[in-house]
Image (cartoon, helix red, strand yellow):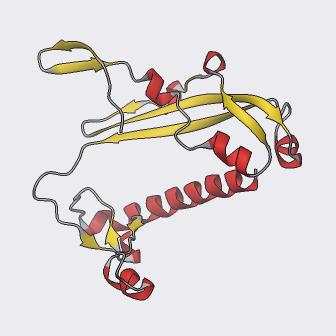
Amino acid sequence: MWGFKIEKEENGKYWIDATEFLFQDAANVSGTLQRSNQGTYKIDKSRSALYLDGIRNFPKNSEFEALLTFTGNPTGRQINSVTPTAASVTVRQHHSFIELPDDNYQPRFYDPRAGFFDMTYMGIMQSRLTSLLFNGLLRATGWKRKIRKQKLVNRLSRLFIMWIEERRNLLSRL
C-alpha cells in the first residue's frame, strides 16, 4: 500500500508526485543480492531516473518504468561476472497502475488455454491437491474477449510470460 500526496486538484483531476514510489526497491533486488551472498546494495537515487520510453498512459491503465541504480559492496563471484563494475548495478523496474474491475466482476476458474496468469491459493484447512483443483482462479480484469482476438491474445500472453520468466531466471542467477 502507498499513500500519494495530492499536489494539485483541478476539475476532478488529481496530480500526484509518484517519484518516491517509483524509486523504491519494489522487486527487492537488494534483498535478493544479499540473500545470494552477492553483496550489500541500496538504491542510489541520484543515479536513478525514470525510463521515458517505458512510460505510457491509457484510458484504464498507466505504465511506468524506472532505471534504478544500486550501489554497494560486491562480495560474490556471480555479480562480478555479469556487470562491468559490480559496485553499481542498474536495473529497470516496471509498475502498472490498472483500473480495478467494477462491482459486476466475477472471478473465473483458471484454464491454461486462456493465456492469462493464474492465481492459486491454499486455505489453511485444505490439502494441496484440493487447493489446486478448486482454488485456481484467473487473474483478469473482467475483459470479455472476442473469438477473433483469441489467437493474438494467446500469442502476446505467451511472449509476456516468457519475458517474465527470463527476467526471474536472470535475477535468480545473481
Residue positioned 60% across, 36% down in the render: 92
Residue 7: x and y, percent?
28, 13
Is 37 above or below relative to 110?
A: above
Q: Is residue 158 left or right of residue 166?
A: left
Quadrant in the rendering for residue 165: bottom right
* Residue 36 image position (x, y, % from top left): 75, 52
**Is 88 positioned to the left or the right of 55 in the image?**
right
Q: Which of 84 and 20 is in front in this view?
A: 20
Q: Residue at x 45, y 61 (%)?
A: 157
- Work out which quarter of the rendered image holds the N terminus and state it: top left
Q: In this view, does 90 lie to the left or right of 127?
A: right
Q: Nearer the viewer, residue 154 or 38?
A: 38
Given residues 130 and 79, the one toward you in this image is 130
> Percent position (x, y) of residue 162?
57, 60
Q: How many marks?
A: 0
Horizontal side of residue 49 vs 99, given as left or right: right
Residue beneath the point at 37% across and 76% down: 124
Residue at the outermost front position: 125
| Residue 117 placement: quadrant | bottom left
Residue 108 lies, in percent from the top left, at 25, 71
